[in-house]
Image (cartoon, rainbow, N blue to C red):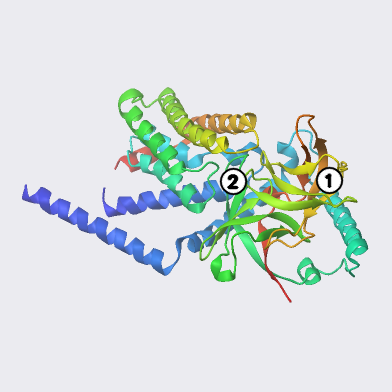
Amino acid sequence: MSSSRIFFLLFIFLCLALLETSFFASLPGVLRLLPITFAVGVYLVQSRGWWPGAWLIAAMGAFLDFAGIAPVPLQTIAYGIAALVIFFSARSLFSNRSLFGILACGTLGWIAHGLVQTTVWLIQNLTDPARPTVGAYARVFGWQFLLLMCFFVVLFYTMPQRTRMDIHR
Amino acid sequence: MLDTVSRRRTLRSRVMIAIATMGIVLLVFPLRHALGFIQRPFVVAGTWIARHSFGLFEPGAASSARVARLEEERMALAIDRMACEQMKTENQDLRERLSFAKRGGYEVVSADIIARTVGVQTSSFSINRGQSDGLRIGMPALVGNGILAGKVIEVTQTSATVAAITDRGTAVAASLLNQARTIGIISGLDGILAALGYIPKDQTVRVNDLVITSGLEDLIPSGLLIGIVNAVESKDTEPFERAIVEPLADIRRISSVSIIIRRIP
């Protein structure tokens, strides 16, 4: 990857990460739960075949841990594993660049991320004297998944063809 | 073959130059400080939308103007009551019209929120002030006229992370404004409410009692308003009861806080 591409990737990542943790996180209701960086990463990898997009997902975990605003610790690992799962599933499992492909690939990545995050969360709650509130945790996770799927549909149907060619260039 | 080798070398040198440039930029301008400058307008925009569309996303909520007016009234009443109670017990001449910092004799630093966590159980946010502004771990973050919003949990040179009072990981020494001045520890509950625990069963706790800081922590002075008791939970098998507290500071609708640095002697 050329240095200009590295800078481009870094620029895209910073824009998305800042948008997610500053703008979207300040919005009311469930809108603040939209994992926009994750969604764009999956879209670029699966639908556009732009493999460096997986780095966006992995870097988001590191950014959350670095900024100290991760809802559950060790997000670097959770997002890193999700990025790997998305990368390999987009290449070999859901390589068909259809709406079904992106939804399936995103679901698999989100499940991988969720499994790691939930494991960390459960371990963290083992030492918590108060009972862990599984309902609230599951609600957030479910809403994030739903928003993610909706965002995939929006991305899939609204992104113009020209951009797709630009990225491949 | 030679062409491939030279292309690889060019690529490697370009990557090295890119990394070195980024390294120099990050050394000259601390990353979090630079990011905070960019993030601030996003937080302000998001908070503005949240303030003006609150009723749309909360089931059964009133209009945003009505909510704002009622909240102002409630906050004013709570502050009035706290001031009266303190006057009675400590015989201090509190003057309502003075700002919190001047009234309490505190040196405060105002800070802007630059990022928030995404989740319900954890409610923390980053601010654009750090060690260089005198911030330390454990200092209280306030909103409005002396209402506790959270506690500093992480500090870097130019930024800090504040865990809100509703964060499950936060624990603050608090007391109730009842006759016995019952003390306990308040911690977050599901990111929306807080719970005042370790209340002995012989204490009388009533709904609508005010919760304030007890002053048992080094960096958090007593008398900072936290919230109002919404319900009291008691189990026969447990030696303590628990009060569910509705915090007065709603971090979803604020974009700046004040940090108490020290008390002016």
SS at mark 1 in the image? helix
**Residue A25, label in figure:** 2
Q: Chain of mark 1?
A: B
Does residue B142 lie above or below A115 as drawn?
below
Mark 1 → mark 2, Cα distance in angstroms: 24 Å
Residue B178 percent across, percent down from the top left: 88, 50
- Relative placement, left or right, of B262 versus A82 is right
Is residue B23 in view? yes
Which label sits in the foreground, 1 or 2?
2
> Looking at the image, which residue is at 82% across and 43% down?
B229
Q: Which residue is mark 1?
A: B66
Quarter of the image where one finds residue B135:
bottom right
Does residue B95 lie above or below B113 as drawn?
below
Residue B47 percent across, percent down from the top left: 66, 51
Q: Chain of mark 2?
A: A
Of B165 and A28, the residue lying toward us: B165
Residue A153 percent across, percent down from the top left: 50, 30
